[in-house]
Amino acid sequence: MTLLYLMINGLQIGSIYALVALGYSMVYGIVKLVNFAHGEIIMVGAYSMWYVMSRFSVPAWLAAALSVAICSVLGMFIEKIAYKPLRNSDRLSLLVTAIGVSLLLQNLAQLFFTANPRMFTNIFAGTVTIGERQFSNATTVTIAVSTIIMIGLTLLVKRTKIGKAMRAVSEDKETATLMGINVNNTISFTFALGSGLAAVAAVFYCCSYSQIQPTMGGMLGLKAFVAAVLGGIGSIPGAMIGGLCIGIAESLTKGYISSKLTDAVVFGILIVVLLIKPSGILGRRQNEKV
Amino acid sequence: MLEVRDINVYYGAIHAVKGVSFEVARGEIVTLIGANGAGKSTILKTVSGILRTQGGSISFMGDEISSIDACKLTRMGLSHVPEGRCVFQQLTVEENLEMGGYLRSAAENRRNIERVYDTFPRIRERKRQIAGTLSGGEQQMLALGRSLMSAPRLVMMDEPSMGLAPVLVRQIFDIIKEMNDAGTTILLVEQNARMALSIAHRGYVLETGRIALSADASELLDNDDVRRAYLGG
């Protein structure tokens, strides 16, 4: 196992964490909610892809697109029925609601698909040779597509009208309303975007780990959450950096220490961040407005 | 242009605005003066749809607006500069202006941004800067400029002089006067009553949620009660 090999694998799983972490961070930025149901969106993305492909034998790209669409709509729907009515209540109620939604989705999945793991066919089979080493197509496609998505997302948030509106709403909803920005639509859009990214992450994840089950979103979501905190929750570049760092840390732990210790290292990082710099790498210190 | 009839606003059990009626005619500067907590900001927030009145009516350009979504009012030509300026601290100056013209086309925005820069040369110098790094006076200018981006017919301003040095207050009020001369109708809420009355045509004095007095600005400046209560004798 060379360092390069471990780094590339780290970038692969790190890209997946980053895509999920972006959802946590964007949603936190706009409604100040740690959306603990976000991990379950990954699971829904994986199951909808698996179901569509095994049931209707549609081409993989179409199944992936459908899965992204289903997750985006689900994200908006959850926000509308579960979070929006609580927008002005305290944050603890929101958090507990998010945990409730998470349990609901997990149990619904067990009800419909049973708790047995299902096999997921890798849609990016095959390998490519870079230098002297072989990498699976899943690895290269994951890293390449995630990079493109993250660049696109950065441009969307920085340059486009809806991206600027997202930043304005996350800063001050009342003033944003006075500008004529529809705050509800902007929040819906953010949830759709975050959930769509989670579905993309699900597709990549399943192509490398080939098994899906109703509880798969739990650990994956939690690690991505750690990535978001490490990068600075609320920060979009932070989520990307945090995701890649966690992925690489995991991969190096597997290669040089023990694969049994990866979870311990990831959550160890969380503890260290919370102790030393709770606002994360790129997080802003919260200045309460008076 | 704006006709407010008998509005009542509650914060929970607190009756903050009690049957207030007033009107603003085209081309006027009208000011609402009164002490802290008299209900001035509450009235503006109710007109712009952030708070709701129980009963009564608010009509703008002949349309009843008391139950319209707040985010639709800018399109109708009503603009509200909130108390404390509320520029988007983490957006650049130019992005703040673009937000002011959120419902306008990109071409209109480019034109209006130039116009705002002509009115506020200081803002032009700082257009790529993050708004949170501007001084208080510059932020107030940005907030005024941002309100002009929607090409409003009526601008409501909440305490534009708050926290500014006297020389800047003078400057801001000169600008407000210029905006009015250029054809924008203005509803001005101020604690700095002398300054507000010096540029306003008419004024209303608010006391604990009720209109206590209404008259031409010059009359209010001469009124003994007003002088004692709000103008420092």
Image (cartoon, helix red, strand yellow):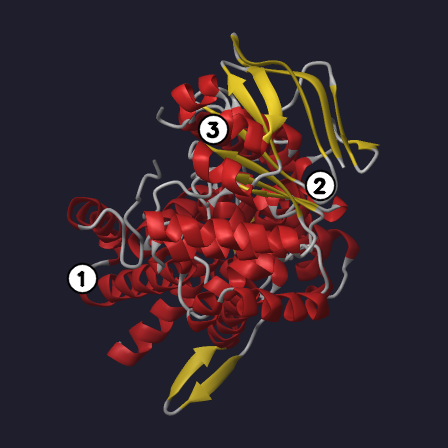
Left or right of residue A275: residue B19 = right
Q: Which mark is residue A257?
A: 1
Disc 3 and disc 2 on one polypeptide chain: no
Mark 3–mark 1 distance (CA, rounded to whole Å): 39 Å
Label 1: state its secondary structure. helix
Residue A177 position by quadrant? top right
Q: Chain of mark 3?
A: A
Q: Which quarter of the rendering shows the C terminus of chain A?
A: top left
Q: Is residue A285 above or below residue B96?
A: above
Q: Nearer the viewer, mark 2 or mark 1?
A: 2
Q: Is residue A245 above or below residue B187?
A: below
Q: Chain of mark 1?
A: A
Q: Which residue is mark 2?
A: B73
Q: Residue at x 18, y 62 (%)?
A: A257
Label 3: state its secondary structure. helix
Q: Position of residue A127 (x, y in %)?
A: 50, 80
Q: Which quarter of the rendering shows the N terminus of chain A?
A: bottom left
Q: Amino acid at mark 1?
A: Ile
Q: Is residue A218 above or below residue B137?
A: above
Residue nearer the viewer, B42 or A268: B42
Q: Nearer the viewer, mark 3 or mark 2?
A: 2
Residue nearer the viewer, B123 or A111: B123
Q: Residue furthest right?
A: B62
Q: Amino acid at mark 2?
A: Leu
Label 2: state its secondary structure. helix
Q: Which residue is mark 3?
A: A94
Residue A264 in view in this figure: yes
Left or right of residue A1: residue A228 = right
Residue nearer the viewer, A134 or A82: A82
Q: Residue at x 23, y 46 (%)?
A: A278
- Neighbour tally class for label 3: few under 14, some 14-19, many 20 plus, Cα within 10 Å: many
